[in-house]
């Protein structure tokens, strides 16, 4: 190897080293984009389609679904099973069962489009895993909503009942006006003298001498 070749190779190697170190330094200064999965996950984009899920009504904490069954009829894969019941004090039905067969669902979206109440949407779950196929053949979507509802209740405690109406306060009786005295100065009130005690009547009262009948005069015999 000639001296000229050795110098050129040394120069090329040094230039390559500097180029590599410059790229490394530039990337090291950028913010970290690595996600520590599964401890961290990225938010899914809006158009991501996970399995369908029931939507919670933020006003009531219950499902918006009223079990009308239109999504069941719209599903081309016959993947949905829905049932409903009337809750106490309500006029219309509410969903009580919502099962999805995720093994046959094609995520076509017909059910979401057919729903007149906007009660279902695609979930953002991308890492649903199981060792049991049945977990996907009968996915209990209603149970998942109930878990959401429990979380909702924690942040929306039931307001306390309004207090019973308090009894009206007793009307104060006006004080009896005091008769004006001739003297403006408040004269000290003098207690009336105690009435002298009556003489004791227990002392024996001498009975008036009864007029004794005169003794009959004895005639001298
Ligand atoms: S996304 Fe399509 S296949 Fe899946 S449940 Fe809805 S209608 Fe059925
Ligand atoms: S999700 Fe919508 S279409 Fe399906 S049963 Fe409920 S209200 Fe009806």
Image: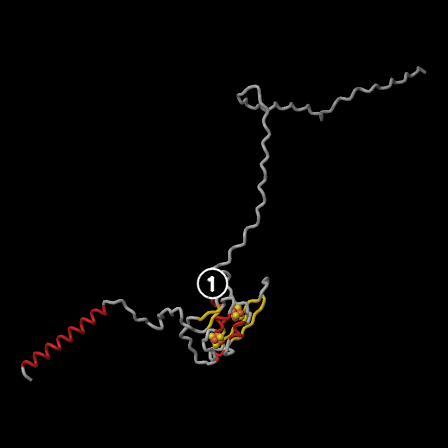
Instruction: Residue 67: give x, y in percent of width and height.
Output: 55, 69
Q: Residue shown at 57%/50% (left/top)?
A: 164
Check disc 1: other Cα within 10 Å, few if <14, some if 14-19, many if 20+: some
The outermost residue toward the left is: 3
Q: How many marks?
A: 1
Instruction: Residue 27: give x, y in percent of width and height.
Output: 23, 70
Q: Residue shown at 66%/24% (left/top)?
A: 197
Q: Quadrant of residue 1?
A: bottom left
In the rendered structure, the answer to whether residue 19 lies left or right of residue 93 reads left
Q: Residue shown at 58%/65% (left/top)?
A: 92
Residue underneath mark 1? 152
Instruction: Residue 156: give x, y in percent of width and height.
Output: 47, 59
In the rendered structure, the answer to whether residue 86 lies left or right of residue 210 reads left
In front here: 190 or 173? 173
Above or below 179: residue 99: below
The outermost residue toward the bottom is: 1
In the rendered structure, the answer to whether residue 202 lies left or right of residue 115 reads right
In front here: 17 or 216? 17
Dot 1: element? helix
């Amino acid at each position: 190897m000639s001296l000229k070749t050795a110098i050129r190779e040394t120069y090329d190697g040094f230039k390559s080293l500097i180029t590599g170190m410059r790229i490394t330094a530039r990337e090291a200064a950028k913010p970290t984009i690595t996600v520590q999965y599964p401890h961290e996950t990225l938010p899914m984009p809006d158009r991501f389609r996970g399995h369908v899920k029931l939507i919670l009504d933020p006003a009531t904490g219950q499902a918006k679904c009223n079990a009308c069954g239109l999504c069941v009829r719209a599903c081309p894969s016959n993947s949905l099973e829905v049932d409903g019941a009337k809750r106490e004090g309500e006029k219309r039905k509410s969903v009580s069962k919502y099962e999805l067969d995720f093994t046959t669902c094609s995520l076509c979206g017909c059910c979401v489009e057919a729903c007149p109440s906007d009660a279902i949407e695609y979930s953002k779950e991308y890492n649903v895993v199981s060792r049991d196929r049945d977990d996907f053949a009968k996915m209990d979507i209603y149970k998942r909503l109930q878990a959401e509802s429990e979380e909702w209740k924690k942040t929306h405690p039931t307001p306390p009942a309004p207090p019973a109406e308090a009894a009206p306060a007793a009307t104060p009786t006006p004080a009896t006006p005091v008769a004006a005295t001739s003297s403006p100065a408040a004269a000290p009130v003098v207690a009336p003298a105690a009435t002298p005690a009556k003489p004791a009547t227990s002392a024996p009262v001498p009975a008036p001498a009864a007029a004794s009948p005169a003794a009959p005069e004895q005639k001298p015999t």
